[in-house]
Amino acid sequence: MGLSEGDLRAGLDALAAIEPAFAAAIARVGYPAPRIRERGYATLLRTILGQQVSVRAADAVWRKLEAQVGDAGDPAVVATASDEDLRACGFSRQKTSYARSLAEEVTSGRLDLAHLPADDEEAIAQLVRVKGIGRWSAEVYLLFAEGRADIWPAGDLAVQIEVGRILGLDARPGEKLTRALAEAWRPHRGAAAIFTWHHYGAGADAAPV
């Protein structure tokens, strides 16, 4: 499971001691709520469904899928569903392909979500071998579903925007700079990422003072 509330607060307190700008930002907008998802196939499938659509739209597709095929969290069910069934639930042609790829990887045992490598980069490498799972999706899964404390999705636009705002930079840093800036925040980068999304959600209230 993801980082608990206690783990998240402890990570942010440690981060605040390293980087005063984070201490000031926490004082402005408070601590974020935990972001916790279940470990396993269903969470990864929902990640695929959520790509490039709203949370509400992805939830609607998931509900239709469960109504159409039964246990949507069972990869064998999705693997044997027809393309017509999946399209009727709102899957695009591309997402149908991705969902089948994930289901086949899990049912074949090539992807064992209960025993991913302990090394974060090795775990990411296993996940991105699945069609439709890019680095960002892999990182978010490892952070939210496995609670890996040092995951840093530097390619996320909101993370980049808020790192720039929190640190008072003149412009949004790109992925390479966002990754470099966070080197000093190890091993608390997962808490930093969750805080940047919280800071982003705070909107104008998060403006540096």
Image: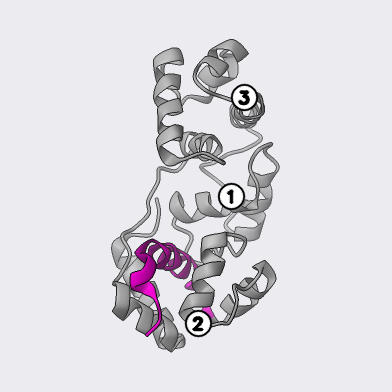
* Residue at position x 33%, y 64% in the image: 32
Indicate the quadrant where residue 173 lies: bottom right
* Residue at position x 52%, y 74% in the image: 163
Tag 1: amino acid: Ala
Look at the numbered discs 3 and 1 and tell me whether their residues touch, using CB distance below 8 Å: no
Tag 2: amino acid: Leu
Residue 196 magenta = yes
Tag 3: amino acid: Thr
Q: Check disc 1 and report the residue beneath it.
A: 138
Counting other residues with Cα less than 10 Å from the Cα at mark 2, is it few (<14), some (14-19), or many (20 or more)?
some
Query: From where the camera sits, is residue 186 visible?
Result: no
Look at the numbered discs 3 and 2 and tell me whether their residues touch, using CB distance below 8 Å: no
Viewer-proximal residue, 115 or 208? 208
Viewer-proximal residue, 11 or 52? 52
Residue most extreme to the front = 204
Mark 2 or 1: the one toward you: 2
Q: Position of residue 104 (x, y in %)?
A: 64, 26
Mark number, residue 209: none
Q: Position of residue 188 (x, y in %)?
A: 47, 73
Counting other residues with Cα less than 10 Å from the Cα at mark 1, is it few (<14), some (14-19), or many (20 or more)?
many
Q: Position of residue 128 (x, y in %)?
A: 67, 46
Q: Check disc 2 and report the residue beneath it.
A: 167
Viewer-proximal residue, 166 or 112? 166
Distance from the alpha carbon under mark 3 to that under mark 2 = 41 Å
Indicate the quadrant where residue 7 lies: bottom left
Mark number, residue 96: 3
Q: Which residues are magenta?
A: 185-209
Q: Secondary structure at mark 1?
A: helix
